[in-house]
Image (cartoon, grey):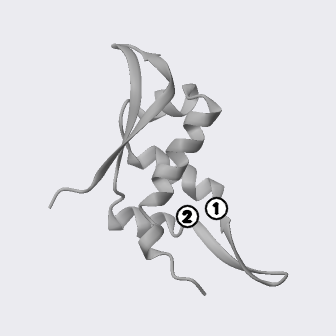
Amino acid sequence: MARERKTIPLKRPIEGPKGRIAAVVLQEPASADYWILGDPRTWVKAKGGMALVDNDEVIRAYTERMIVEPDPLLAMNNLSILDAMAVKTGVLSFFEDATPTP
């Protein structure tokens, strides 16, 4: 079965070796990625309840593995901050149904 893919359109396209890049394509992480990297977010006790905290290093590692177009390093080193945030949101969207509320 093919893994799900999501296309994130870029607000500020970047240049690659083959020309203009207007989108980043993410592929759903494999279970092996999850067993190696763990959860991209963690529930922590906070004043007044629980808070979901991003594990930035884990999110970066997932992003490097999940970008299938263009080259992950090209994308991660050249995206505008708004596009980087959109890619991060796209990466995290694959985990939304799997994040139980404490």
- Which residue shows up at 50% across the image and 64% down it? 37
Q: Secondary structure at mark 2?
A: loop
Q: Is residue 20 above or below residue 80?
A: above
Q: How many marks?
A: 2
Q: Residues within 10 Å of mark 1 (few under 14, many from 20)?
A: few
Q: Position of residue 79 (x, y in %)?
A: 55, 29
Q: To which quarter of the image does residue 9 belong?
A: top left
Q: As drawn, is 18 to the left or to the right of 38?
A: left
Q: Nearer the viewer, residue 42 or 90?
A: 90
Q: As drawn, is 68 to the left or to the right of 39?
A: left
Q: Is residue 48 above or below residue 9?
A: below
Cα–Cα gap, marks 2 and 1? 5 Å
Q: Give the residue pinned by disc 2.
A: 40
Q: Is residue 14 above or below residue 23?
A: above
- Which residue shows up at 34% across the image and 56% down it? 28
Q: Is residue 90 above or below residue 81?
A: below
Quadrant for the C terminus, please: bottom right
| Nearer-N-terminus badge (2/1) | 2
Q: Position of residue 35 (x, y in %)?
A: 42, 70
Q: What's under tag 2, amino acid-wise?
A: Pro
> In the current view of this chain or complex, which residue is farthest to the left?
1
Q: Residues within 10 Å of mark 2 (few under 14, many from 20)?
A: many
Q: Position of residue 44 (x, y in %)?
A: 72, 78
- Which residue shows up at 36% across the image and 58% down it? 29
| CB within 8 Å, label 2 to label 1 | yes
- Which residue shows up at 60% across the image and 67% down it? 41
Quadrant for the N terminus, please: bottom left
Q: What's under tag 1, amino acid-wise?
A: Asn
Q: Nearer the viewer, residue 93 or 34?
A: 93
Q: As drawn, is 10 to the left or to the right of 30?
A: right
Q: Give the residue pinned by disc 1.
A: 55
